[in-house]
Amino acid sequence: MIKHFLNLEWKSFFRSASFGKSLGIKIFMGLFALYFMGMFLFIGFFMDKILKKVYPDLDPLVAFSGLIFFWILGDLVIRFFFQKLPVMSVKPLLTLPIKRGKIVNYVLGKSALSFFNFLPLFAVVPFSIKLIYSGYDATTVLVWLLTIILLTLINNFLNFIIESLSAETELSFLPIILFVGALYGLNYFEIINISGALSKGITAIYETPIFILIPVLILIGLYIYNFKILRQKLFLDSGLKTEVKEVNASNLEWTKNFGDIAPFMQLDLKLIWRNKRTKSAVWIMAIGLLYGLFFYPQPTYQNQEWFFVFIGVFSTGIFLINFGQFIPAWDSGYYKLLMSQNIKYEQYLKSKFTLMAVSVVILFVLGIPYVFFGWKILLAHFACAIYNIGVNTHVILYGGSFNRKKIDLSQKAAFNYQGTGAVQWLIGIPLLILPMGLFALFYFLIGFEIACLIISIIGVVGIVLHQKLMKAITVKYLESKYKIIDAFDQNN
């Protein structure tokens, strides 16, 4: 039966009407995956030297085990936003004499082959080989490696449980924030030394291999729990309904994962790639990503930690700033037609928000190698990314309600100031000056870490209040709707 499922997916992949159109996206994602594989492989080969430099008094194996808690938290957050349960087209299968248990086992088994589960191996396998080559007992290292693999799979199935809880709440990201935030807080404030306990547990496992049964039993328990949840929802008219909707084939079929905002995201992505002016926003992303290389390699800026926040906001938010400041002027050519349709304005704005938020996450991840210049730089970029998602996305959307200048997308991109007005200049105050001012204030009064924490907290507050903020912004756009239409009708 498993072989039959694989055969069906293979035929579905190649016989799809969108195969040729989505091939470019698949190639891009493949290159993106190769980038991370290479980065993890590089880290794995030099992990022992990095750990000896950072923790000179600790054994590399013990030091690595002590950091696994933080890797688990980061892995959970990334999985929550990017890894979804690989549910195939089960709608036609449910009408056939196939047991639901077999379908569920296939779906859960397929999730174990996710890229997120293989990626850590590119770091831990080279590290393990170097440990054995350095004289460590091979059995000890292999048991340790097996433990890391089990923890990765535990994260895999734990993520699906958190996602199932998220589906029942209005704020879909609230369960992951509460779960990860609670664990990190308990450990950070030393209420419960979770990282130390986990490190000792891993040490006990590779010193006494019989204890490997503990993570094995946890993994089995999570699998069974996921099996029960998924099996209960595996009906034609409930549970997986949103996962098995039939959609029209398109070259942006993957956007259907974003639900009711998918049509608007498709319009935005096509607009970006098909026009000179908007296409420049993509190339400017590369400039913003490499912006830190103009400053961080220079010793002068290494001691100016207060300046990190400016680079962080700019580097992780370059697409947000460049694309977002002209919302909704990008759609000025067909704005009247768009507003005459039976659509919800909040969905239109939510698609813009999602596009900007995703760009922030991608730019932050691609900017992780900046840690080579110091861990404080990575911390500042992380705080700025949260601030960009929680605050700057909402600020720039609100500022868009005051845009009154039309943009001709067919015009040249270079030195084109069409659509630029007072709003674009004033919006720079909350986007850049405000976070820099807050960061500098707490940096000079208390310290770097607290300043980063304050910026992060403000961003988290914005994320938590996202629904309310979007409703307020939607009201503002609705009030300005006819003024914007009238302004976009003007050719001057």
Image (spheres, rainbow, N blue to C red):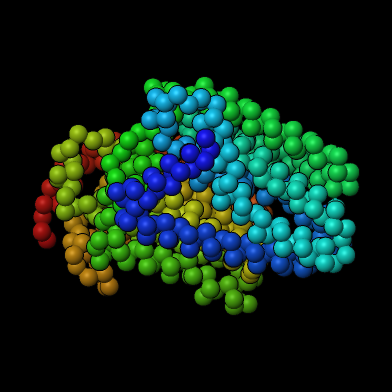
Residue 402 shown left or right of residue 395 in the figure? left
Q: State the image coordinates of residue 250 (x, y, percent, origin top left).
A: 29, 48
Judge by depth and name the residue closer to the eye, 200 or 403.
Answer: 200
92 or 216: nearer the viewer: 92
Looking at the image, residue 437 sits to the left or right of residue 423; the answer is right
Q: Which residue is located at x 60 percent, y 64 percent?
A: 39
Please name the residue shown 77% across and 63% down the image.
Answer: 129
Q: Nearer the viewer, residue 18 or 61?
A: 18
Determine the image quadrant of residue 209.
top right
Q: Is residue 203 visible?
A: no
Q: In the image, 458: left or right of 349?
A: right
| Number of numbered markers | 0
Establish if 343 lies above or below 420. above
Residue 374 in picture, x, y percent from top left: 66, 66
Is residue 488 at least partly visible in the picture? yes
Q: Indicate left or right for 350 with 86 as reference.
A: left
* Picture quadrant of residue 337: top left
Measuring 45% from the left and 24% from the top, which residue is drawn there? 97
The quadrant of the picture occupied by the C terminus is: bottom left
Residue 60, position as x, y percentages in the image: 82, 60
Q: Tell me: residue 166, above or below residue 381.
A: above
Q: In which quarter of the image is residue 155?
A: top right
Coordinates of residue 37 in the picture (x, y in percent): 59, 61
- Residue at the spot x=42%, y=26% of the render? 96
